[in-house]
Amino acid sequence: MNDLAGKHLVLGLTGGIAAYKSAELARRLQDRGATVQVVMTESATRFITAVTMQALTGRPVFTDQWDARQPNNMAHIDLSREADAIVVVPASTDFLAKLANGLCDDLLTTMCIARDCPLLVAPAMNLQMWSHPATRRNVARLVDDGVVVLGPASGDQACGEVGSGRMLEPHEILDDVIAFFQPKRLAGRRLLITAGPTREPVDPVRSITNHSSGKMGYAIARAAHEAGADVMLVSGPVSLATPRGVVRIDVETARQMHDVVMREATRADCFVAVAAVADWHVLNAADHKLKKTTTVEAGDGHAVPGLELRFEANPDILAAVAALPSPPYCVGFAAETEDLHGNAESKLARKKAQMIVGNLATEAFGRDDNALTLYTAAGRTVLERADKLVLARQLVAAIADRLPSTESR
Ligand code: CTP
């Protein structure tokens, strides 16, 4: 996907063992459509060569503030003026300290001070260096100065110690850079989202579920976070990674999903019910594994091998949230196999939701793309077939357009 099409990034490297991950990041940024100009400090060249970065980006690397290649000999100005952002990966303790204090004794720091574009930094250092009071002060000052700090993460460090200060992985930095460029149309808003299937037990080793992959709900959670929202995702069992920055609560059954959602819904500005919730649970679920010798009564009164399940309706989570005294803006999904328009319109009225997002289950479940129709009291909007993340961003923009202001709740 070309999330970064048209974006030109300066990728700054400072001295740290995590510099080897910048090679992968340079590649991934370009896969998403960005052009990348690398600037390295002298220390960075001790960890990874300029040749590697040049080969990966197709552009000569700048390492020296006295580099005379720019016609006006002002690489520190020219390189940043062309950039949509400077992203420093890894950002060493020394680099952060210099930046926080306005020092500029090499090309990268001079360029950062001289820039007129956003600056993102991904710190990478030993846990003692990260927790040192000087680093804490420097990072706080950088945040105050408007620098975006990505991570760091916690975990195994190159020095053998374990703790905070480890650089984010290239794919996480990539997601954060993509998110940075998305318009913040939901800043300060809270979104509660359900996703995936639910699983209703038959016995301790068997259950009834459906084919929902969770991909659409997860894409919406990601898009909402990118748009600046505070996002809580209540998820049925899926094998998907939690989008960065999203709080996820795992549930199995529809009743568990209902309980979590009802606890959280009063604090949400918007509830997006994407989960394919089971309509029923098994009333006579067994608390031990059912054997295949289990019998049921045949028509003639004899016991024959078989299994009889009785079902009871699950609570309708979307309808319950929409019926709260002061409900959030409610968005439901209608996954239909026939009469999409009729079913979606009737769900809009029946569930008292403000929006129903209609799609054909046969063309959506498990796939990476989808096509959506948004139904509101004002009419229909068609979102043409596209990747689920592209659609999710369009849906989030449509929700942002319609979301009442916080004061009106
Ligand atoms: N939904 C819900 N709780 C349920 C069932 C559905 O919150 N117990 C939500 C879904 O997350 C979705 C919307 O309601 O946003 C519509 O779900 P769907 O399964 O299509 O509709 P049903 O209510 O099951 O109606 P029908 O069986 O007529 O299709």
Image (cartoon, rainbow, N blue to C red):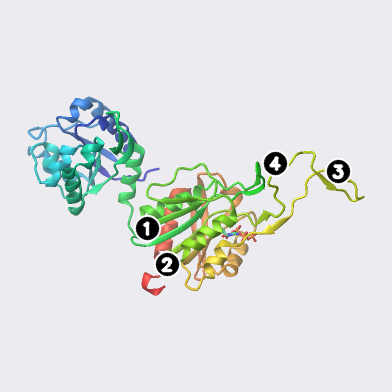
User: Would you name the residue on which mark 1 appears?
Assistant: 229
Q: Which mark is nearer the camera, 3 or 1?
A: 3
Among the two numbered marks 3 and 1 on one chain, the one whose residue lies closer to the N terminus = 1
Among the two numbered marks 2 and 1 on one chain, the one whose residue lies closer to the N terminus = 1
Among the two numbered marks 3 and 2 on one chain, the one whose residue lies closer to the N terminus = 3
Q: Which mark is nearer the camera, 4 or 1?
A: 4
Q: The disc labelled 1 sits on which kind of residue? A: Ala
Q: The disc labelled 2 sits on which kind of residue? A: Arg
Between the residue at mark 4 and the residue at mark 1, the CA separation in whole angstroms equals 44 Å
Between the residue at mark 2 and the residue at mark 1, the CA separation in whole angstroms equals 15 Å
Q: Percent x, y for residue 150?
A: 28, 45
Q: Kindly state the secondary structure of the residue where label 4 is placed.
A: loop
Q: The disc labelled 4 sits on which kind of residue? A: Lys
Q: Kindly state the secondary structure of the residue where label 3 is placed.
A: strand
User: Would you name the residue on which mark 3 appears?
Assistant: 304
Among the two numbered marks 4 and 3 on one chain, the one whose residue lies closer to the N terminus = 4
**Marking on residue 289:** 4
User: Would you name the residue on which mark 2 appears?
Assistant: 402
Quarter that holds the N terminus: top left
Q: Are marks 4 and 2 in contact (CB under 8 Å)?
A: no
Q: Percent x, y for residue 76?
A: 12, 41
Q: Is residue 2 above or below residue 54?
A: below
